[in-house]
Image (spheres, rainbow, N blue to C red):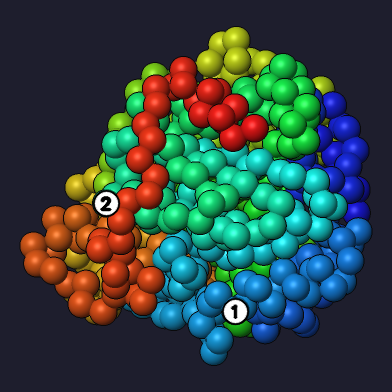
Amino acid sequence: MKYVSTRKGLEATGAESVFRGLAPDGGLYVPSSMPRLDLSRCADFGACEDAVTAALFDDIPLAVRNEATARLLSRFPAGDPVPLVEKDGLHMLELFHGRTGAFKDVALSMLPVFMRHAAGGRRVLILTATSGDTGSAAMQGFAGVEGTEIIVFFPASGTSKIQRLQMTTPSDANVHAVAIEGNFDDAQSAVKRIFADPAINALAASKGITLSSANSINTGRLVPQIAYYAHACARLGGECDIVVPSGNFGNILAAYCAKKMGAPVGRLVCASNINDVLARFVKTGVYDPGEKFTVTNSPSMDIRKSSNVERLLWMLNDGDCEEVSRLMADLAAKGRYELKAEAKERLFADFEGAVATPGETLAEMRRMRAAAGYTVDPHTAVATFAAKKLGYPRRGVPCVVAATATPYKFPETCMEAFGEDVLDDPPPAFVNLESLPVAQKKTVGIDGIDEAVKELF
């Protein structure tokens, strides 16, 4: 399987796409084609991961792929790593049973294995921007992995207390977390700029270091996520609609890729909080981040500039790199872009969107608990609210909701929603978190991100 960059069609192997993270032209790597998936292998989650990685990372040796799957399964409950449970007429795909309680744990259990193979003994410094969950999952995933070092940039305000502790208490020598006086968009823009900076890359190379990423811009994040959607369809025995609370668009893009690979995925619903750029985009075909950024009670979705949409643009335009480049140039120059008519038709054929305000999110958390005895985190509540608002399930087709985080990551919001402490059985990794010493204490302004990276060279 060859990978190509979205802007100039630069080719790479699967391993090279993992190692580089961002393509040299500033775009993202995408599979040059979407091979058919052997759905008969997808009823078992581990076998489904093996099938997906065999199809999309066929240049990575079988032993490495098997190691990555084994590492993933060792970090999730053995009986059922990603449970699918029916609550209030919706099928909740619980993706939060990993070490940090968020769906990012799935891919970030596998990515370090792929990265170590792709690096081939070279030293790698992994730059990661996070709105809350990616950072802790990446630090857990790469902690102690030989030949790698990781630095995570997270907003100094806006994350939950648990999210901050998960990033600031790890003390492994190769993991670093830095708070920034800014938001996720600021961090992501800085990381992308550093990747494209010849001087910084030359300085890193002079020290024997290659820069890469653990964000969802990396194919090693995207590919493993495809499997749990194919697995959900296989378990339900046929077509299902899928609702995903989305911030950087990587998770819902994985569901779209599963559909492109033959999984019987019907409609895809992009659920947004009031930073509703994505919900508006899938409704109108116009991507317009605007100037307004709001800190909400679903902080992992507090994003206005979603990187993975660029991959969708490439797919909607039949791999037309010139059109993708035009759209991205419009975003840089005009602050917005609009799809052509044919691309809009394709977008609308598969996607729709809905929005939940912070107040609606709290009310939905209460409703789900009253209706089904099921406590959801605020991000999952945005998704269940969107599903119900749009009338799912419908057409007699099951509706799968991506339950992307455990409520134990957001005790403050749960307390606000329920007026009492309803979180009485924390996951083992959460039990002693608040008693651990804080090891990561650095805070920088946005203009200090470059120096924080160079300090690790």
Residue 195 spot, x, y in % from top left: 68, 28
Residue 169 spot, x, y in % from top left: 37, 54
Residue in front for this viewpoint, 267 or 450 = 450
Please indicate, yes or no, whether residue 339 appears anywhere in the rendered image: no
Q: Is residue 34 above or below residue 450?
A: below
Residue 285 spot, x, y in % from top left: 58, 32
Which quadrant: the N terminus? bottom right
Which residue position is annotated with label 1?
Answer: 74
Question: Mark 2 falls on what kind of element?
Answer: helix
Write down the quadrant of residue 236 in the picture: bottom right
Please indicate, yes or no, whether residue 250 appears anywhere in the rendered image: yes
Residue in front for this viewpoint, 78 or 315 = 78
Amino acid type at mark 2:
Lys
Q: Is residue 255 left or right of residue 359?
A: right
Q: Is residue 108 above or below residue 20?
A: below
Residue at x 56%, y 11% (from the top left corner): 334
For label 1, the crowd category at 10 Å Cα-Cα, with few meaning under 14, some 14 to 19 and many 20 or more, is: few
Residue at x 39%, y 22% (from the top left corner): 445
Amino acid type at mark 1:
Ser
Which residue occupies the extreme top position in the image? Answer: 333
Residue 78 spot, x, y in % from top left: 56, 86
Q: Is residue 119 above or below residue 243?
A: above
Residue in front for this viewpoint, 357 or 157 = 157
Q: Is residue 418 left or right of residue 389?
A: left
Q: CA distance from mark 2 to mark 1?
A: 27 Å
Q: Is residue 210 above or below residue 19?
A: above
Which residue occupies the extreme bottom position in the image? Answer: 79
Q: Earlier in the sequence, mark 2 or mark 1?
A: 1
Question: Mark 1 falls on what kind of element?
Answer: helix
Which residue position is annotated with label 2?
Answer: 161
Which quadrant: the C terminus? top right
For label 2, the crowd category at 10 Å Cα-Cα, with few meaning under 14, some 14 to 19 and many 20 or more, is: some
